[in-house]
Amino acid sequence: MRTGIFIVAAQFPGREAGRVLTDAVELVVAAEEAGFDDAWVAEHHFMSYGVCPSATTLMAVAAGRTTRIGLGTAVSVLSTQHPVALAEQAAMLHHLSGGRFTLGVGRGGPWVDLEVFGTGLERYERGFAESLDLLLAALSAERVAADGEFFRFREVRTVPRAPLRPLVACTSPASVALAAARGLPMLLGLHVGDEEKAAAVAAYEEQAPGVAVRHVAAAVGHVADSTARAVRELKESMPRWLGPGLAGYRPVDGRPRPSRDVDAYVDLLTRIHPVGSPEHCAESILRTADRTGIDHVILLVEGIGEHRRTLENVRRFGAEVLPLLRGEPGGPGSPPGGLSSPPAPASG
């Protein structure tokens, strides 16, 4: 089982954005000290849901503060930046981190970001495959050129290069098919449960038989002395962030803004993700791995909205949950008889 933390740089009411970003780097350092395998950060613009506009920049800072932990973007949005520029940043992070960096990319949404950065709605709607292919070429080839619908330029030398294969955020059958066609691992999000994740993995394997990649599943992770207390804490805290945060998604055109019942959403997250006692959290993660074949989970740890308590959450996961996932005998909070063994690594 591979376990990481997932940071969105959530801005709870009353918190200053710069402080949130500073605290995000501290969470990566704490995750390394706690024994997590990796740390991932998301990119958002113009909203309180997440205040990190450049996941690669934050990971560069984190690389200088850590020595062992893997670092990744979950995700960098391809629809609002040039694929070659992103490839250059990823290659730099690969070399400067000693090979610890993984690039995650996504299509993003039809948000106002497209207008602000000048990339446009058409590229979001039709250009993701072209952007992804150009990114792959810029990462792997000695020279790159483009003559497509959205990118046209003469051949240039790629400096630096890096042997990176990004993972792709998949939220639809089309993105699953695209990742499968390119042989790239999927990142599956917080909003879907085990059944939907298993269906995405099955669809991928049907379209890319024999391709051996390691998919990643995002989940909310919150540990407390009891499951009832952990659930209660998140139900009290998360709506304060999610309410205004989700309202920050502004479509660039006239389409209706997506809406969600925040309280119902938090209830769903606490039911389908590892939110509870150490034993409950470990059982939840192992159950998801068994049902989906995904043995790499990244945990959103910021749901409580208070930095000291978030650090405690990270440290408790490291001390009380990770030993159970790894089958370490006598781990803190180990239940009588131990937990079920982690599944064998998935073929997909």
Image (cartoon, helix red, strand yellow):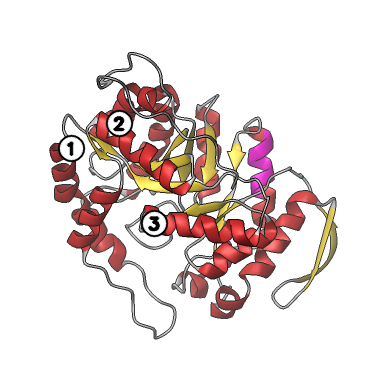
Q: Name the spot of residue 190 as percent of width and height, x first.
A: 37, 54
Answer few, some or many: residues within 10 Å of disc 1's Cα (few below 14, many 20 plus, some between 14 and 19). many
Q: Secondary structure at mark 2?
A: helix
Residue numbers of the magenta segment? 89-95
Q: Residue at x 60, y 44 (%)?
A: 347
Dot placed on the residue nearer the N-terminal end, 3 or 1? 3
Q: In the visual, does 24 lie left or right of 97?
A: left
Return the disc, 1 or 2, that comes first in the chain's sequence.
1
Q: Is residue 165 above or below residue 321?
A: below
- Distance between mark 3 and mark 1 Cα atoms: 23 Å
Identify residue for label 3. 195
Q: Quick check: 307 above or below 18?
A: above
Real-space Cα separation, disc 2 to disc 3, in angstroms: 31 Å
- Quadrant housing residue 98: top right
Q: Identify the disc placed on residue 190.
A: none
Residue behind mark 2:
311
Could you tell me the amino acid type at mark 1?
Thr
Kind of residue at badge 3: Glu
Foreground residue, 206 or 134?
206
Is 247 left or right of 131, judged from the image as shown?
left
* Residue 50 makes an appearance in the image: no
* Magenta highlight on residue 13: no
- Residue 117 located left or right of residue 41: right
Query: Residue at the top extreme?
Result: 330
